[in-house]
Image: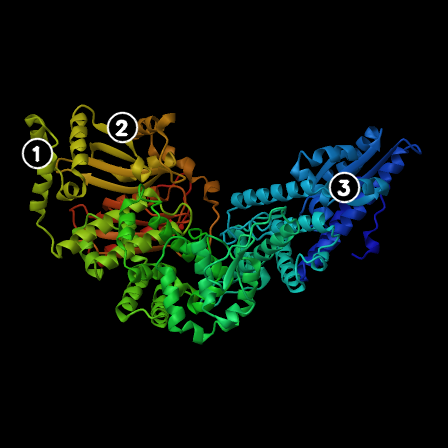
Amino acid sequence: MSGEELQIVLDGDVLGTVRSFLEKVEKRISALHEGNEDPLPAIQFRTEAMDRLLEALYLKAERDYGRPGGGFRAALLSQGGYGRKELCLHSDIDVLFLYDGKAQEFVKFLNERVLQPLWDAGLEVGFAVRTVRDCKKLMDEDMTILTSLLDARHLVGDRTLSDELQATVEKYFSSKGNRDRFLNRKIAENEERQEKYGGSVYLLEPNIKEGEGGLRDYHSVYWFARIFDRIREPADMVARGTFTEAEFGSLWEALRFLWRLRNELHRRAGRRSDQLVVEYQEPIAHWFGYSNTSQFLGVETFMQKYYSVAATIRNLTDKALRRLNRREPSLFPPPEIPLQDKNCRIVDGRLTPATADLFEREPIYFLKIFELGRKLGVELDDVAKERIEQSLPRMDEVFRTSPVACAFFKTMLSDFVGLGTMLETMNDLGVLGTFLPEFGKLRFRVQHNLYHVYTVDVHSLFAVSELGKIAQGDYSQKHPTVTEIVRGVTAPDRKTLLAFSILYHDVGKGEGKGHVERGAPLIREAAKRLGFPPADVDALEFLERSHLIMTHVAFRRDLEEQNLIIRFARAMQSLESLGMLHVLTFCDVKAANPDAMTDWKAALLDVLYLKTRGVLEKGTFTKEKVSELVAKVLVEVIRLFPLEEDREKCREFFSMMSPRYLLATPPQQIAHHVELWERFRLNPIVFEARPVEREGLSEVTLFTWEGSALFSRMAGLFAAHNINILDAQLNLSNRGHALQVFRVVDHEGHMIDASDGKWERVEKDLRDVLQGRVPLETLVAEKFRPSLFKKKVAHVAPARVDIDNDVSAYYTVIDIYSQDRTGLLYQITSMLSALGLYVDVTKISTKLDQVADTFYVRDIFGHKITSQERLARIKEALLKVIEEAPTPDWRPPKF
């Protein structure tokens, strides 16, 4: 569609003509977008097309109105992205009707004749109707309107009226007070915006317009340059010193990437869309030309490029804002602060080299300046950052292996407080990745799943920051165990070892799949280069190889299995290794995403740590006799009952309950269950729900007669009420009583609010189901509506069922890995019941989009399942369940 073809003649059927014109424009824009890596032709074409269309509609309306020769003036202006000529494929059209005099009737006529055809044709159009006086009044009242007026561009109508508005805006900003007010309010607004959209460049699903490192960061600099330097075009910022020519070139290249990405997002969504959500990332990566390799997914490489672009925009715009801010010098500038270290000084509150050749003359300051800034509590200024980036080639192999540099870096690691923030700055400037080349490969590296919301390097640095928070006592009340461990690490070399193990725990991800195995030689190589003694090199390799083990055991295994704890204790090299692994695991999970470390998970890690520590401290790796342990528990429980008749009931309760239950349950809880047993004699269904504040969950206890598929029915009941099971202890007495204890949260992972009568409704449905008044399938069917299975997912791993007969002395352990969906646990437990399996313990682990559930099962005789034929049939049946979405009339098959 050429420039001549942009001509539009509005005679006869206006709406039909507008629609035809827009169809031609859309086809041309699509061709420009698909066939051109440069997004600007498509953006510029759409802007010009909208200009022509609005001009034609305005002029026709003006002719049709037949306005008299005088009495009022009117003009039409574009605003926002349209005013800046940045119209992406589905950007909204923002216009301003400006008038002067008694033009209300004409403006109303314009509204009907200009806007209505656009709305009817499906365009998203925003508009305002104001006089110049209105605009002037609103400048002080509304920051959004004031900002939009900076972008206002004359389209058609009375040019002198548009010029008058422009002059009014310029006069407003001629006041230093107004400029300062706008600057401060906009900076505060930017901080709020970035907080709202995640507060980091490196989010899993970034907003490419409003998020940090997005288009809005550039817009802010552009607006400030407009009011401080009165620029007209973005390139004018070079002449005015906002950017150097090289910086502006880098910025513009990054912006072109974002504009192209935004166009593609709009195309795929069919509307204005700025969130780079997971379901679009893979197809967009393919569209951009990124393909999978043997080590990395194409989408991971594409997202690595995105984060690089966003970091470039963030860093350049931050630097430009500081330059612009310095254009308005304070009447009382902060004095220069002398330092004991004569190689550095503080200017305007920031740390800077005292001489231009500092890094060439004293390379140790590549590290030392960051440590000095941390101790003084000040940031580096732009001069320091620029000189560091320019001098990075001097950080060569000689420097990386220098005993002085390595010793100094290890000293930096021995102080946990502020360490993460300091390392983040080093990482942003390329120092960390240059000094530690293994870590450099993690830069912008993506973990394409919904569990990790940050890039690998940022996740690792956040994990180090978590170590600093523990050291500062931030978690002393909520997580006392891990706080006690960190406070016990006092020797500088031990602190360095712990910090480095956390920094490098995911180093293998820079090499591709199988990061634990790939990371082991890398951490050894780096540790040797840094001068760690051989024993510490071995300890670091142990921690890197083991950093996934503790979560697996704590979250997915039965921690009451003595054999399991003994085997885990044997795998630990020492009490120190156990403690450091606990701290590393805590920091790793805490830094994965804001909701990853729940109170429940922290409690499980503590239980595993404390039980294992007990074995290591005793130095015995043999099981105590079960009868002796049960006798000890009985003594503790009986002490809780002052009356002899209650003690006799307690002895009777012990005689009917399994040793596993008696050893796995705290004495106070056993005593409470004895009381529930008393209630059971009067009511065959005893239901109780209570909050467990410290762990952020609710504990549900059911005491009733054992029935067919009782656990499966409870799973279905909970699913029907949007309750998620985290853990279940399923106990059966030798008299046929079922004592089931569930730890549950709501569908968002929070403790259930009982104030609205939720537990009363659950109990009513439970009684109706168990007493046969209401079929469970009726309650669950609603959860199997197809619409509920439309979830966004990241890269989906294939469903998997693993069966282990070695991990437990008494049970066959089934591990199920699958994509999560509503009602899945109910289906799985129904199938287990249909297969003739009895579940005594289950661990439910859901990481946003993936489940990893574990079931400790036995057959009807209480034995493990050993028949290979039967094990194969179990595996096949479970795979079929988790791979096929259910219908509302779903029932488990009968075997």
Look at the numbered discs 3 and 1 and tell me whether their residues touch, using CB distance below 8 Å.
no
Figure check: 308 above or below 179: below
Q: Which residue is denoted by mark 2 in the rendering?
A: 771
Tell me what residue is drawn at x 82 percent, y 56 percent.
3
Spot occupied by residue 625 in the image (x, y as percentages of width and height):
8, 49
Callout 1: helix, strand or loop? Answer: helix
Instruction: Tell me the amino acid under the disc marked 1.
Output: Arg
Mark 2 and mark 1 in contact? Answer it, CB < 8 Å: no
Rendered location of residue 764, percent (x, y) = 32, 26
Tell me the crowding category of disc 2: few under 14, some 14 to 19, or many 20 or more residues within 10 angstroms, Cα based.
few
Q: Nearer the viewer, mark 3 or mark 2?
A: 3
CA gap between label 2 and label 1 equals 31 Å
In three-dimensional space, the C-alpha distance between marks 3 and 2, rounded to whole angstroms, equals 80 Å
Residue 130: x and y in percent read 76, 33
Whole-percent x, y for residue 210 in the image: 58, 47
The numbered mark at residue 663 is none
The mark closer to the camera, 3 or 1, is 3
Q: Earlier in the sequence, mark 2 or mark 1?
A: 1
Q: Quadrant of residue 771?
A: top left
Image quarter (top left, top right, bottom left or bottom right) of the N terminus: bottom right
Reading the image, the residue beneath label 1 is: 651
Q: Which color scheme is applied?
A: rainbow
Q: Is residue 121 visible?
A: no
SS assignment at label 3:
helix
Pick whichever, 667 or 364, lies toward us. 364
Q: Residues within 10 Å of mark 1 (few under 14, many from 20)?
A: some
Q: Is residue 270 above or below residue 733?
A: below
**Which structural element holds mark 2?**
loop
**Observer-nearest of 364 and 820:** 364
* Residue type pointed to by label 2: Gln
Mark 3 lies on residue: 171
Judged from this view, the residue extending furthest toward the top is 682
